[in-house]
Image: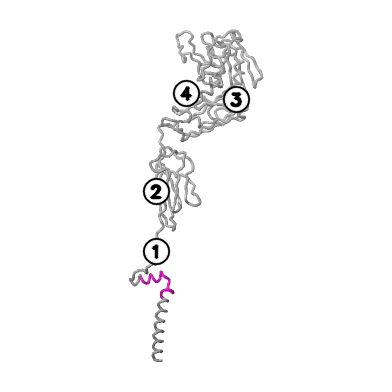
Amino acid sequence: MKVSRGWGSTALGIAVVVALGLGILVGVHPSAAAGAFGAAGSAPVAGAPTVDAAPAPVVHITPAQGTPLNPTDPITVTVTDGTARAVHVTNTRTGTAVDGTLAPDGHTWTSTGDLAYAATYAVAVDTLDRDQAPGRTDGTVATIAPKAEAYPSFVPAPNSVPTVGVGQPIVVRFDHAIADRAAAEKALTVTSSPAQPGGWYWISDTEVHYRPQQYWKPGTTLTVRADLYGVDLGAGTYGSTDRTMTVKVHDAWVAKADGASEQMQIFDDGQLVKTMNISLGAPGFPSHTGPHVISDKQPSIVMDSCTYGVCEGQPGYYKEKVDLDLRISDDGEFVHSAPWSVGQQGNANVSHGCVNLAPADARWFYDHFGIGDVVEIANSGGPALPVYDTYGDWELSWADWKAGSAL
């Protein structure tokens, strides 16, 4: 029994020790145990879990540094292995902040609106890694630097006249030569209501005209767009801006001047409303034939023959104030009041190329005709108005006109 009791005591003691040992290993959280071991200077328990730091977010800024960006394209930021908290983009020269949109998931940011030419933008991306630890990535983006920027002027100028006549072409004039006409033409659009077929014709490297196949329909509304900003126009020249204008067309006022009869018939929307005696250019100064379009209107001007080479002391020289003037070409042709030739009007062509009218007829014509209205001249003995002479557009057939397009 003593042996038995002794073994039992020994067994009990062993059991207590084992139980206490199990209590230490099972009842205490491993981290606490490790901490306790650590505090005692003991090595960590073999196989205990370790915690790795989250990887840093990967930020991509497009375009990459050193690749110039077209200012109409956006700056984009993408973030993987984390998210963007905020993106700040600033023009380094002006300090202007660039607006943009951050996706709800925080993985992409895209700038909105056009940027500037020849600018550098600082890009700062505030990030969070997978454990929500903050970070920051910085970069820069540069935009293209054109050798020249071509500005598009419109004729008629926006809001310069309330309406135009049926013969008015749409004119775009650039302040720099255009090497890539096709690129420019693709950026130009004219929308007509009611719809009418039309096309562009390049007068020169700096001027392009748009007209329909026939005169505009009365009451037409024209919307002109030049979406040229960011467009590569060739030879290092880019479009400087985007522009839009709206033009309205009034009644179809067309005057038909006949050098054989020395009369001019006036039509309003195809209806004959008035006939006037006229005098066209004399044999030495014949008026150009074909459709002319009124491009300017002045109550009086001083006409000086020296502007086209006949100066004081030469035969045919004149310098005189003339009233009620409507310009129909850049070659010095006008419809105007000519009280000095009333006796020849209806009988002989004696002008220097203009359409001479009696004062009363000139007043009526001045009051009814304006920018874009048409004066068609026939049987004058002169050559056709050149297409490049403000506006000889209607001298060309539709096939020839379309051949002047760059597309």
Judge whether 224 appears above or below 16 on screen: above
Q: Which residue is mark 1?
A: 50
Which stretch did the figure color magenta? 24-37
Q: Marks 4 and 3, Cα distance to the nearest angstrom?
A: 24 Å
Residue 31 in the magenta stretch? The answer is yes
First along the sequence among labels 2 and 1: 1
Q: Which residue is mark 4?
A: 204
Identify which amino acid the numbered label 1 is placed on. Answer: Thr
Residue 119's x, y, as percent? 41, 39
Which of labels 2 and 1 is toward the front?
1
Do the CB atoms of the residues marked 4 and 2 lie less than 8 Å apart?
no
Which residue sits at x=40%, y=50%?
A: 137
Do the CB atoms of the residues marked 2 and 1 lie less than 8 Å apart?
no
Residue 251's x, y, as percent? 63, 24
Q: Nearer the viewer, residue 154 or 163?
A: 154
Q: Nearer the viewer, residue 152 or 96?
A: 152
Q: Secondary structure at mark 4?
A: strand
Q: Marks 3 and 1, Cα distance to the nearest angstrom?
A: 82 Å
Q: Which mark is residue 216?
A: 3
Q: Residues within 10 Å of mark 4 (few under 14, many from 20)?
A: few
First along the sequence among labels 2 and 3: 2
First along the sequence among labels 3 and 1: 1
Q: Nearer the viewer, residue 237 or 265?
A: 237
Quadrant containing the N terminus in the rendered view: bottom left
Q: Marks 2 and 1, Cα distance to the nearest angstrom?
A: 32 Å
First along the sequence among labels 4 and 2: 2
Q: Nearer the viewer, residue 81 or 304?
A: 81
Identify which amino acid the numbered label 4 is placed on. Answer: Ser
Q: Which residue is mark 2?
A: 138
Q: Is residue 297 visible?
A: no
Q: Marks 2 and 3, Cα distance to the nearest angstrom?
A: 57 Å
Q: Secondary structure at mark 1?
A: loop
